[in-house]
Image (cartoon, rainbow, N blue to C red):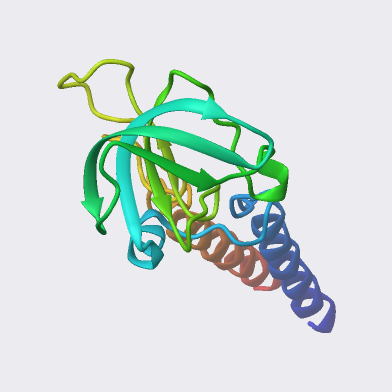
């Protein structure tokens, strides 16, 4: 009887271990300061839409089209910005339209940058990091209740092994 109980316990542990091994990893961010889109917007003291007219090693210049949050950003705006998303910067491209969040006169991946279509149109903008694309999955990769299905499978396997062990014993 002890052998059957220990075999059943080992089977349950093995099943749980397999569930953990095949579970998805959370999204990996190159920099550790990645916030959700809502958090980025809340932290920003300025949010503008515009076209980048100049890119240097430490700044960008935008021709501002509209201001969503904040004041004093009419015409052109110069923001501190560094290239390289691995270091939480952003690789801006001259001539590209963006929705840009700014905190203390700077911007980057953690502050909030969203590329936009070249011409104003009814096409929805691309999703910012941490924001779901229209009609896409949630930003954490959650596509439904697969964890529930995996748990039910483990319980069913354990119950089946227990019933099989009892039938063999009886």
Q: Is residue 59 above or below residue 112?
A: above
Q: Residue furthest bottom?
A: 2
Q: Looking at the picture, how far across and down is residue 62, in whole percent?
A: 40, 34
Asked whether, in this view, residue 49 is left or right of residue 27, the answer is left
Name the foreground residue: 8 vs 65: 65
Q: Quadrant of residue 148?
A: bottom left
Q: In which quadrant will I find the N terminus?
A: bottom right
Question: Number of labelled discs?
Answer: 0
Q: In which quadrant will I find the C terminus?
A: bottom right
Name the foreground residue: 30 vs 80: 80
Q: Looking at the picture, how far across and down is residue 29, in whole percent?
A: 64, 50
Q: Looking at the picture, how far across and down is residue 46, in whole percent?
A: 34, 56
Name the foreground residue: 149 vs 126: 126
Q: Quadrant of residue 168?
A: bottom right
Q: Looking at the picture, how far across and down is residue 20, in whole percent?
A: 67, 60
- Identified at 45% across, 49% down, the residue is 112
- Identified at 66% across, 60% down, the residue is 32
Q: Is residue 159 above or below residue 107?
A: below
Asked whether, in this view, residue 69 is left or right of residue 1, the answer is left
Q: Is residue 50 above or below residue 131?
A: above
Asked whether, in this view, residue 1 is left or right of residue 110, the answer is right
Q: Residue furthest left?
A: 122
Name the foreground residue: 57 vs 155: 57
């Amino acid at each position: 009887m002890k052998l059957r109980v220990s075999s059943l316990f080992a089977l349950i542990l093995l099943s749980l271990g397999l569930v953990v091994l095949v579970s998805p990893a959370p999204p990996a961010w190159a920099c550790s300061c990645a916030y959700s889109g809502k958090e980025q917007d809340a932290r920003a003291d300025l949010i503008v839409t515009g076209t980048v007219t100049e890119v240097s090693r430490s700044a960008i210049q935008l021709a501002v089209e509209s201001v969503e949050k904040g004041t004093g950003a009419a015409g052109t705006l110069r923001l501190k910005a560094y290239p390289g998303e691995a270091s939480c910067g952003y690789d801006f491209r001259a001539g590209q339209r963006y929705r840009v969040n700014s905190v203390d006169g700077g911007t980057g991946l953690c502050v909030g940058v969203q590329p936009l279509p070249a011409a104003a149109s009814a096409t929805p903008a691309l999703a910012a990091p941490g924001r779901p694309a229209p009609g896409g999955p949630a930003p954490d990769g959650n596509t439904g209740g697969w964890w529930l299905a995996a748990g039910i499978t483990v319980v069913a396997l354990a119950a089946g092994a227990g019933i099989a062990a009892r039938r063999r014993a009886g």
